[in-house]
Image (spheres, rainbow, N blue to C red):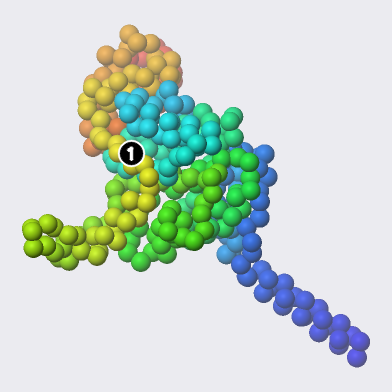
Amino acid sequence: MNEAFERLLQRAESLIERIEAVLPQPLSAPDWQASVAFRYRKRGGHGRLEPVRHMAPIALADLQEIELQKDKIERNTEHFVRGLPANNVLLTGARGTGKSSLIKACLNAYAPRGLRLIEIDKDDLVDLPDIVELVAQRPEKFIVFADDLSFESGEPGYKALKSILDGSVSSTGDNLLIYATSNRRHLLPETMKDNLGARHSEDGELHPGEAVEEKVSLSERFGLWISFYPFSQDEYLSVVWQWLACYGVPESEFELARPQALVWALERGSRSGRVAYQFARHYAGNRDANPMADAEADA
């Protein structure tokens, strides 16, 4: 009788453990001293903050030809770190022009003053309230970073983000802001049929339909919009020279590298900071690997 009862207890305990394993668990605090940046990851239905062990060493001074954008986000982040009023930020525009790099550079600049970053994927935005609650009592300042953000109609993360930004009963508190990047200014796809709901008032004023209003409403909840634009050829080459200098290429070789840099951008269909950085790594790597080769040779 006792043996049967013991086996029954063991089976019950095993069943309880399995049930507990699949039930939602409260988000536990990481080791906040392990890093200045964390990634929110979800495995088996459970979310956790994992420290980023190797941070990109990019500095604000490394980012060229985006001085206006840099000034806006640096001023907003400075206010945030100092405890002054600051805005959530949406960075939109051309790909590869430094949107994500600018946020990482801000973290590197302000981490010694208590700034921390939590990166979260679009699919996990439904858990954003848990992150807000976890950091609410921390002394640090937190940026929740959502990179390359865009939504399709009906995605759950859209409503979660919209609620947190503005409109929910709960607030994000004074120690957390959301910085997001996107190639879409309004974060949702815009279609011709959206305009079918537009109407004209008697005095000729055009009023957008509900579909357009809904799509604009999320981006409007970001207090600061920062737009990025494709580089001109001169701007692109200026960034190329800057990165070549960073990799130790003497200025006397810049003009020799110019044709290769232009072909590199043409092949990729884009003149941007990312393309300039990739070319500089390619050129400097080949130069170091073949120090006696003619600098004009096409690698």
Q: Quadrant of residue 281?
A: top left
Q: Residue 208 sits in which quadrant?
A: bottom left
Whole-percent x, y for residue 103 in the image: 44, 36
Residue 214 position within the rendered picture, expressed as x and y whole percent measured from the top left? 29, 61
Q: Is residue 122 visible?
A: no
Give the crowd class for mark 1: few <14, some 14-19, many >=20 residues within 10 Å.
some
- Identified at 59% across, 38% down, the residue is 36
Instruction: Give the image location of residue 162, x and y in percent.
Output: 40, 57
Judged left or right of residue 165, residue 15 is right
> Which type of secondary structure does the marked residue at label 1 adopt?
strand
Return the residue nearer the eye: 194 or 94: 194
At horizontal 8% and vertical 63% (from top left) the residue drawn is 202
Quarter of the picture holding the N terminus: bottom right
> 114 or 39, which lies in front?
114
Q: Which residue is mark 1?
A: 226
Query: x, y percentage for residue 215?
Result: 29, 58
Q: Residue at x 45, y 40 (%)?
A: 86
- Which quadrant is the C terminus positioned in? top left
